[in-house]
Image (spheres, rainbow, N blue to C red):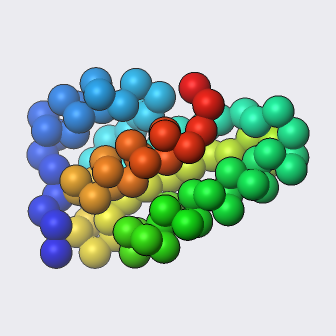
Amino acid sequence: MPARLSPDELSAALHGLPLWSGDGEGIHRSVELPSFRDAVAAIGSIADVAEEMDHHPDIDLRWRTLHLHVVTHSAGGVTENDLELARRIDALLPG
């Protein structure tokens, strides 16, 4: 199981992920897409990455805005796996 990041490690990591925020309980990002269909397509792309990593974010779709939440529940907080998933999600989304 991956180790939970310390508050200092998480703070440093979030500097490299400027579109994400959060704390030891999880990291978050919201993104508005041009249309509902674009938002749904983005979910499909995120799902492909999540399945490949076997690490799945919480996704909330509100019309054309995605709200993403990532945490490693089994570690009780944020791990390097969450940061890698966030990086891979960022590569798929505008921002």
Hey, which quadrant is residue 46 in on the image? Answer: bottom right
Instruction: Determine the residue positioned at 23% across, 56% down.
Output: 79
Left-right relation of 4 to 71: left
Quadrant containing the N terminus is bottom left
Horizontal and vertical percent position of residue 53: 38, 69
Q: How many marks?
A: 0
Instruction: Determine the residue positioned at 76% across, 48% down.
Output: 39
Instruction: Determine the residue positioned at 87% across, 46% down.
Output: 36
* Residue 92 vertical placement versus 21 (above, below): below
Report the front residue among 73 and 20: 20
* Residue 86 vertical placement versus 81 (above, below): above
Quadrant containing the C terminus is top right
* Residue 71 vertical placement versus 95 (above, below): below
Instruction: Determine the residue positioned at 49% across, 39% down.
Output: 90
Horizontal and vertical percent position of residue 86: 41, 46
Horizontal and vertical percent position of residue 72: 32, 65
Left-right relation of 83 to 50: left
Horizontal and vertical percent position of residue 15: 28, 24
Left-right relation of 4 to 30: left
Left-right relation of 42 to 73: right
Hey, which quadrant is residue 43 in on the image? Answer: bottom right
Report if residue 63 is visible in the image. Answer: no
Report if residue 47 is visible in the image. Answer: yes
